[in-house]
């Protein structure tokens, strides 16, 4: 078997878009996510549609033992990889004081620990005959201190800084790192409601997942460092550099507080 592309969070909206884009390009895949049933369905669909080989293995990436088992399975099979796409991540929208300890641990273990651990493992399992391509999904939130998404934004900032630093370290090993920093994407019912709650700004900053996946891969193959999808988002990113972080945080906090209240008010109406 040829060397593979490993995708974490493969059955989510963005993960499936990356998997489909890779399969369409003729690349063999290794997919992981929580649900074996959904992985099996996705793998079968990709193989039937594009004729690629797809290996899958369910894994709870928030659990250290489950991650270790996944990595040991890869090692025992003698698999090698020319690319890793770190998609798996989670967010709990709302005020930090309302988060449970379990929710806090889940964000830290999935967004940070699992991404770092999978990245480290792929350094050992990389195909040394090819340029190793690493894509890590961060967020536009990584650029700002974000009230109502404080822990999520901070976790994505870690991924951005870590990825850019690791990008320099992996150069001598023949690898590149590309960080994807999208704004909203309609991947789940909850994210769609969150986008709707933001009104005009939610709509103009939202990107299609298929478009994002395709262009991110193109950026990675060119060895580019960061991809922010959408001209509006890139403009917002540029303007954010001109404003003091404390003021940015206050503006974002005001905006997200209104959106959060609206989305929860809509949810309350649906429950009545």
Image (cartoon, rainbow, N blue to C red):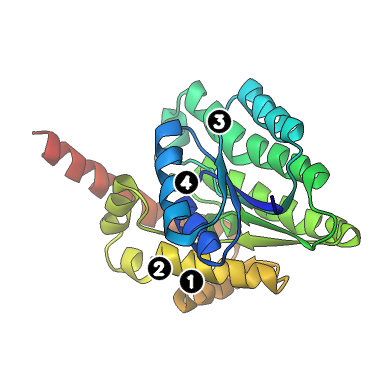
Distance of label 2 from label 3 (alpha carbons) = 32 Å
Front: mark 4 or 1: 4
Tag 1 or tag 3, which sits nearer the N-term? Answer: 3
Residue pictured at 66% horizontal, 67% vertical? 220
Which dot marks residue 233? 1
Residue at numbered disc 3: 59
Tag 1 or tag 2, which sits nearer the N-term? Answer: 2
Asked whether, in this view, residue 58 is left or right of residue 259, the answer is: right
From the top left corner, tell me how far across and down residue 29 is, in percent. Answer: 59, 50
Residue at numbered disc 4: 43
181, above or below 113, in the image: below
Nearest the eye: 19 or 218: 19
Distance of label 2 from label 1 (alpha carbons) = 6 Å
Distance of label 3 from label 4 (alpha carbons) = 15 Å
Callout 1 environment at 10 Å: few (<14), some (14 to 19), or many (20+)? Answer: some
CB within 8 Å, label 2 to label 4: no
Distance of label 3 from label 1 (alpha carbons) = 33 Å
Asked whether, in this view, residue 48 is left or right of residue 242, the answer is: left
Which dot marks residue 164? none
81, above or below 113, in the image: below
100, above or below 80, in the image: above
Residue at numbered disc 2: 205
Rendered-image quadrant of the C terminus: top left
Tag 3 or tag 2, which sits nearer the N-term? Answer: 3
Distance of label 2 from label 4 (alpha carbons) = 31 Å
Front: mark 2 or 4: 4
């Amino acid at each position: 078997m040829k060397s593979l592309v490993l995708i974490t969070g493969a059955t989510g909206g963005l993960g499936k878009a990356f998997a489909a884009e890779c399969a369409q390009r003729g690349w063999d895949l290794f997919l992981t996510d929580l649900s074996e049933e959904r992985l099996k369905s996705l793998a079968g669909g990709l193989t039937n549609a594009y004729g690629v080989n797809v290996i899958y293995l369910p894994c709870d990436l928030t659990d250290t033992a489950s991650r270790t088992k996944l990595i040991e399975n890869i090692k025992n099979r003698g698999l090698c990889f020319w690319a890793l796409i770190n998609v798996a991540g989670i967010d709990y929208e709302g005020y930090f004081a309302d988060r449970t300890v379990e929710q806090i641990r889940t964000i830290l273990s999935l967004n940070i620990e699992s991404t770092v651990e999978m990245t480290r493992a792929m350094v050992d399992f990389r195909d040394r005959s090819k340029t190793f391509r690493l894509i890590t999904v961060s967020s536009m939130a990584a650029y700002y201190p974000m009230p109502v998404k404080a822990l999520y934004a901070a976790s994505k900032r870690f991924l951005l800084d870590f990825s850019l630093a690791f990008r320099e370290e992996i150069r001598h090993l023949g690898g590149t790192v590309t960080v994807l920093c999208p704004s909203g994407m309609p991947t789940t019912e909850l994210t769609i409601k969150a986008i709707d709650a933001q009104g005009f700004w939610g709509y103009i900053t939202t990107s299609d997942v298929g478009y994002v996946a395709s262009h991110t891969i193109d950026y990675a193959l060119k060895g580019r460092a960061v991809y922010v999808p959408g001209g509006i988002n890139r403009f917002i990113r540029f303007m954010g550099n001109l404003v003091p972080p404390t003021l940015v945080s206050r503006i974002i906090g005001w905006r997200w507080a209104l959106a959060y209240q609206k989305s929860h008010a809509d949810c309350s109406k649906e429950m009545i």
